[in-house]
């Protein structure tokens, strides 16, 4: 007489088969950089460890929207710089503090974001007050191409062992009394790995403003907003 398989053994066999299928699926995953938009890191109170450029960019977006000044500082590479649009530099040429260098360093950016994230009042190129920022929202933060190694001929980041790509950005900075600053920029974003106790940690190496998303329209640039909160 045939004897049926006990239910506990059936369950063990089923669990083993499921585990085998999951292992096969994991072995077929994309060996390239990280998470991508289809598989973002899980949302937790703490930012995920920036183990690849895509996780770093997820953190970048959240740091702005949650206005996390300490995490912003931790995200910055020691050699960081932001290269400004020539038009932005020209706009501040007659200001009390012109943008002579044409870029912001890591120390500049940390001070700027401490002011923005803390709700401090800014000042425009005409020395008029700019209302404090109360909230920040990305409408668009979209990677427009794959990560590419930094070229030896790059005018600002040559010699750095990192990667870059282009992002399209629409960013809203809301202020009191329904005042809003809207940034619609094309940015080249640079990232680089550093050793963190034998772990590879990706940091923000730099940003270069390329231009505006809407051709032929007068817009406020990311660099111009930052200049107002130095």
Image (cartoon, grey):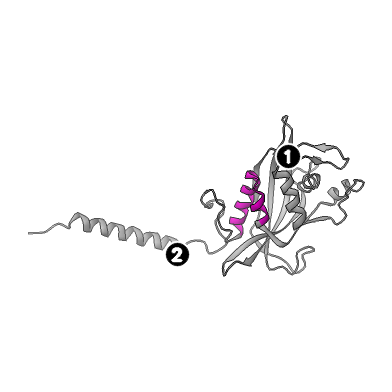
Depth check, front residue: 83 or 213: 83
Q: Earlier in the sequence, mark 2 or mark 1?
A: 2
Residue 114 position within the rendered picture, expressed as x and y whole percent measured from the top left: 72, 48
Foreground: disc 2 or disc 1 = 1
Write down the quadrant of residue 129 in the picture.
Answer: top right
Q: Is residue 165 magenta?
A: no
Residue that extends furthest to the left in the rendered view of this protein: 1
Position of 150 with respect to 28 (left or right) is: right
Query: In the structure shown, which secondary structural element does the residue marked by tag 2 occupy?
Result: helix
Q: Residue sitting at 58 percent across and 56 percent down?
A: 55
Say the numbered circle drawn on residue 27. 2
Badge 1: how crowded within 10 Å, few (<14), some, or many (20+)?
Answer: some
C-beta proximity under 8 Å, tags 2 and 1: no
Residue holding disc 1: 182
Q: Is residue 57 magenta?
A: yes
Q: Residue sitting at 42 percent across and 60 percent down?
A: 25
Q: Residue sitting at 61 percent across and 52 percent down?
A: 59
Say the numbered circle drawn on residue 70. none
User: What kind of secondary structure does the magenta stretch mostly adopt?
Assistant: helix
């Amino acid at each position: 007489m045939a004897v049926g398989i006990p239910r506990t053994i059936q369950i063990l066999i089923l669990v083993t088969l499921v585990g085998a299928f999951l292992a096969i699926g994991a072995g077929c995953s994309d060996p390239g950089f990280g998470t991508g938009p289809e598989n973002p890191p899980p949302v937790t109170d703490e930012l995920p460890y920036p183990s690849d450029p895509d996780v770093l960019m997820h953190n970048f977006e959240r740091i702005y929207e949650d206005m996390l000044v300490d995490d912003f500082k931790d995200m910055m590479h020691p050699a960081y710089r932001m290269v400004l649009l020539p038009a932005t530099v020209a706009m501040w040429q007659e200001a009390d503090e012109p943008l002579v260098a044409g870029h912001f360093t890591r120390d500049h950016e940390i001070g700027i974001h401490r002011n923005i994230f803390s709700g401090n009042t800014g000042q425009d190129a005409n020395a008029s007050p700019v209302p404090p920022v109360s909230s920040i929202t990305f409408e668009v933060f979209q990677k427009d191409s794959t990560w590419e190694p930094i070229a030896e001929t790059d005018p600002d980041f040559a010699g750095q062992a990192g990667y870059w790509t282009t992002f399209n950005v629409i960013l809203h900075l809301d202020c009191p009394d329904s005042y809003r600053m809207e940034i619609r920029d094309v940015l080249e974003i640079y990232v680089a790995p550093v050793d963190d106790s034998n772990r590879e940690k990706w940091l923000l190496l730099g940003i270069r403003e390329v231009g505006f998303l809407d051709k032929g329209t007068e817009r406020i640039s990311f660099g111009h907003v930052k200049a107002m909160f130095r």
